[in-house]
Image (tube, helix red, strand yellow):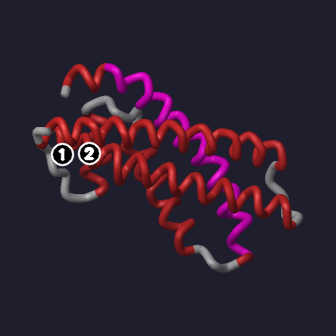
Amino acid sequence: MSKNTKYLALFKENTDLLLLSKETLSLSFIKCKKIGLKAEYTFEESESFDSLSSKFARTADIFTQKVLKTFFIIVGENPETFIDKANYAEKLHLIPSAEMLKNIRFLRNDIAHEYIPQNLIQLYEDVLSYTYELLLILEHFEIEYPKLITRI
């Protein structure tokens, strides 16, 4: 198996993983939208938002750290920073907005480092807002995916 064939297979595998992750993220998003934003949450509601936050972070990581990374390897590009990756992905029409992807990445980092219970209400609000944006990015990517395969 050639190096390029190996990376093409990995790209497809990562994209399939992303689409599965997108489905579970969508289901959690629907559930949490029904719960809505509140000043206080029951334990079960908090668990639902924690699950959404985890799925958001995981899905964002799969897209940025696996799918985009593999794509850039295949096309022979090596953007050095995350901002460079986001800008280049927008330039190639892989995503509709580099700014959206940067905001998603910042929130993913906040999720990974948030321990203060008082800050969770704001985090839940941000997760609801940015999950919608992440799903838009992934829908755009899904539409572009067949075109990508023919280009690489």
Q: Which residue is mark 1?
A: 73
Q: Could you say whether the residue bearing mark 2 is in a helix, strand or loop?
A: helix
Q: Can you tell which mark lies on residue 92?
A: none
136 is within the stretch colored magenta: yes
- Disc assigned to residue 70: 2
**Quarter of the image where one finds residue 11:** top left
Residue 63 coordinates in the image, percent (x, y): 41, 46
Most frequent secondary structure within the magenta stretch: helix
Which segment did they paint magenta?
118-146
Judge by depth and name the residue closer to the eye, 118 or 6: 6
Query: Which part of the image, by quadrant, shows the N terminus?
Result: top left
Task: Please tell me which residue is depicted at 63% across the width and 54% down the height of the picture.
Answer: 127
Percent position of residue 44, x then y? 85, 61
Give the left or right position of residue 29, taking residue 78 as reference.
right
Horizontally, is 52 left or right of 133 in the view? right
Identify the secondary structure beneath mark 1: helix
Does residue 105 appear in the picture of this structure?
A: yes
Question: Where in the figure is residue 75, as x and y percent of width and height?
Answer: 15, 37
Labels 2 & 1 near each other (Cβ < 8 A): yes
Q: At label 2, which amino acid type do we have?
A: Thr
Disc 2 and disc 1: Cα gap in Å? 5 Å
